[in-house]
Image (cartoon, rainbow, N blue to C red):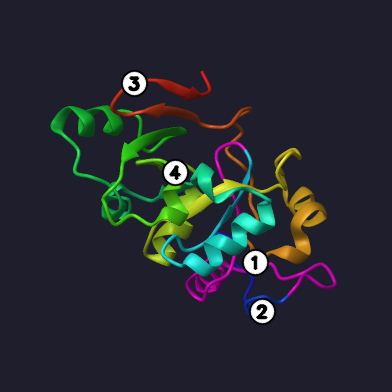
Amino acid sequence: MVSDAKTPSPRVGESWGRGGPRLCLRAVARVVQAGGIVAYPTEAVYGLGCDPRNERVVRRLLALKRRTLRKGLILIAADFTQLAPFLQPLSFDEQTRVAATWPGPYTWLVPTRADTPYWLRGRHDTLAVRVTAHPLAAALCRACGHALVSTSANFSGRPPARNVLAVRRQLGRSIDALLPGPTGGADKPTEIRDLRSHRLVRGA
């Protein structure tokens, strides 16, 4: 956990001036809950996250990334209960399959509930979800009380940021808070598989 009692929480939307705010975990969670975009370390790279239920901030994040809505997004969570509201119920075999890989660097495409927002699933009837094994990312989900949108911290077509300096150089004035810390050390993005078809979508 990152903590700095001397650093005040900035207003949501406050840009990074003079090196910017280094916020503690709870303060970063408050930024998320207030509708902000935050950067945080994940298994391989820094991620950008926000409240998945907030259409306005998700659209702002997509615009920042220069990413089309149609592609869909990944949600990360501290545990499966944070993902369940977005997904169809899993069979026993499906539960067993995902439980064998979580928490961990494995993302599954899971059929969504009928009311899962378009701004999360895009043109798909599945949603990419992961119970993260990264301690800071999981702690942030717990502090927020819900899953987070998770997309790599970079503009589309540019390399993802792997440290705080790279986040600041590429995105510093465009996001609302940063949770500094080491990434998980993985050298490539998480593997993505379709839960129903077993098809490998990315990685391995």
Report how far apart the C-alphas of labels 3 and 2 lie in the structure: 44 Å
Q: Earlier in the sequence, mark 3 or mark 1?
A: 1
Q: Earlier in the sequence, mark 2 or mark 1?
A: 2
Report how far apart the C-alphas of labels 2 and 4 lie in the structure: 36 Å
Residue 146, percent from left and from top: 37, 61
Report how far apart the C-alphas of labels 2 and 1 lie in the structure: 8 Å
Numbered mark located on residue 123 in the image: 4
Report how far apart the C-alphas of labels 1 and 4 lie in the structure: 30 Å
The residue to which callout 1 is attached is: 177
Amino acid at dot 2? Pro
Quarter of the figure with the N terminus: bottom right
Amino acid at dot 3? His
Residue at far right of view? 18
Decide: is 66 above or below 159.
below
Q: Nearer the viewer, residue 1 or 173?
A: 173
Numbered mark located on residue 10 in the image: 2
Numbered mark located on residue 198 in the image: 3
Residue 150, percent from left and from top: 52, 49
